Amino acid sequence: MNNYPIATILGGGGFIGRYLVRNLTRKNFRCIIPTRNPFTKTYLKTQAPPGAIEIIKFGQNNFDEIKNAIENSDVVINLCGILFENRKQKFNTVHVEIPKSVAKLCSQAGVKKFKQYSYDKYEKLEFDLNTIDSTLINSNVFKGMEFIWDQIDTSAITGNSYLPIFVNEAYSQVYGDNLLKEEKEILEGNKVKVDMTLTSPNCPVAESLPQEVEEKIRSIDEVKTAEVEITFDPPWTKDLMSEEAKLELGFL
């Protein structure tokens, strides 16, 4: 049994604890059960192979008795609880002070919640343009792009208007090892959507350019999927060109 993982279970002799201990020993755990009176819990040993369960004495005011057990455990579980107070047992002691002291001992001993863990991660990144008023809408900054104001939304929290100007969604899986203190994130999906326009529907690169843009975006390591849509609303004008493009083509 020396190479088996060790679990210290406070409250292991209770209704839930008995079933947990039984299932853990079936998974080759060695279980240590601290209790106030070890002699009344010896029957627990009959539900597991010899040596799989150890009963130790534990007093509410003396945590030194379970310190050694915690220091040698891979997992520590607290199931202590009472339904009624009496002269010897108080709610605050059982439900607050004992868990707090046990957690402190676990932290000092380096006991982790899990050796390894994994979870799915979803991120949505959105930049918004806030404080939108008539002055901003009518400014020359957005000349030729008035169509964007059709996308204005209202925050359900603040009641203020806002305009989402960039959205990126990503899905990844995260794997971690508490003992090695390492974490690895694997990006499973990252979607980028681009709306682009052409000078005219008869543009000679109308078929090839969108595909080329999509391929360029997909070539980025972090991007898994890309979608390019052509729109002619609003119609293209020279006002949509950057200063550099105008200079390059002799419009300036």
Image: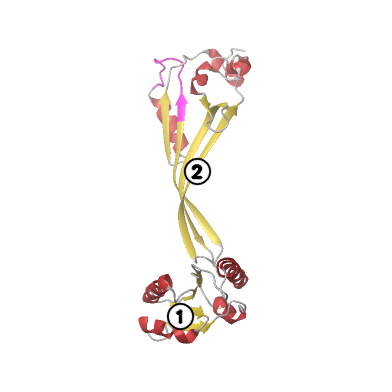
Q: Mark 1 or mark 2, which has the lower sequence index? A: 1
Query: Residue at horizontal 54%, vertical 64%?
Result: 178
**Which residue does the numbered mark 2 point to in the structure image?**
123
Q: Where does residue 221 sit, x and y in percent of width and height?
A: 48, 44
Predominant secondary structure in magenta? loop
> In what element is the residue under mark 2?
strand
Disc 2 packing (10 Å; few <14; some 14–19; many ≥20): few
The numbered mark at residue 142 is none
Q: Which element type, helix, strand or loop, lies under badge 1?
A: loop
The answer to if 196 sits in the magenta stretch is yes
Q: Which image quadrant is residue 218 in?
A: top left
Span colored in magenta: 194-206
Q: Which residue is mark 1?
A: 3
The Cα atoms of the two marked residues, 1 and 2, are separated by 41 Å
Q: Is residue 108 magenta?
A: no
Q: Amino acid at mark 2?
A: Glu
Q: Residue at x 41, y 32 (%)?
A: 227
Name the amino acid, label 1: Asn
Q: Quadrant of the C terminus?
A: top right
Residue in front for this viewpoint, 134 or 242 = 134
Q: Is residue 142 above or below residue 183?
A: above
Q: Nearer the viewer, residue 203 or 84?
A: 84
